[in-house]
Amino acid sequence: MRLTNWTDYSLRVLMYCAACAQREQPATISEIAEAHGISRSHLTKIVMTLAGMGLLETTRGRGGGLRLLKPAQDIVLGAVVRQTETDFTLVECFDANHNSCRLDGHCRLKGALQQAMEAYLTVLDGVTLADLVAPIPGAGGTKVGTRIRLVPGLPSPRA
């Protein structure tokens, strides 16, 4: 299964906000867009959707930005993926309205793929946002004061 860019970027926004949760100033859309090389206008739409889902608080104006509405350990990756992905139809036969497969009823591929997708989502259900931003031993990610280096080689978020 391949995640859409929408879900990928949604996860990046949430992870960035979780990694910056202890900062005095909240993360901003411009900051996240710059750090990940993503269009600011595209991220704005994603942020509004995440806010509508009750995951982000957005504050406009000077000193405004983005903060998680829930603690990172309470945001489950599987739930976010289910809410941001638009299509879990891995193959045509998953959609009864558009299924024209001549093997339908004699093929076990659909069942195997359904089990694989359920296993995939089950794994994601065991991962929280806090798990995604926890330091990886020996990976070189550092947290110094309020400055966080999310990925080696990318600029640190502004404090």
Image (spheres, grey):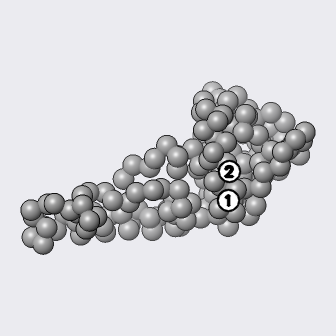
Residue 87: image quadrant is: bottom left
Contact between labelled residues 1 and 2, with CB atoms less than 8 Å apart: yes
- The reply, left or right, for residue 140 in relation to residue 84 is right
Q: Which residue is drawn at 64% across and 36% down?
A: 41
Q: Which residue is drawn at 26% across and 65% down?
A: 97
Residue 79: image quadrant is: bottom right
Q: Residue at x 67, y 67 (%)?
A: 74
- The reply, left or right, for residue 46 in relation to residue 96 is right
Question: Few, some or many C-alpha atoms within 10 Å of disc 2 (few <14, some 14-19, many ≥20)?
Answer: some
Residue behind mark 1:
52
Residue 127 screen position, x and y as percent: 56, 62
Residue 21 screen position, x and y as percent: 78, 51
- The reply, left or right, for residue 133 in relation to residue 31 is left
| 70 in relation to 34, above or below | below
Split into 4 quadrants, where in the image is the C terminus? top right
Residue 44: image quadrant is: top right
| 34 in relation to 121, above or below | above
Q: Which residue is drawn at 65% across and 55% down?
A: 50
Residue 57 screen position, x and y as percent: 77, 55
Residue behind mark 2:
48
Specify whether residue 69 is in view. Answer: yes
Of all residues, the one furthest to the front in this rendering is 97
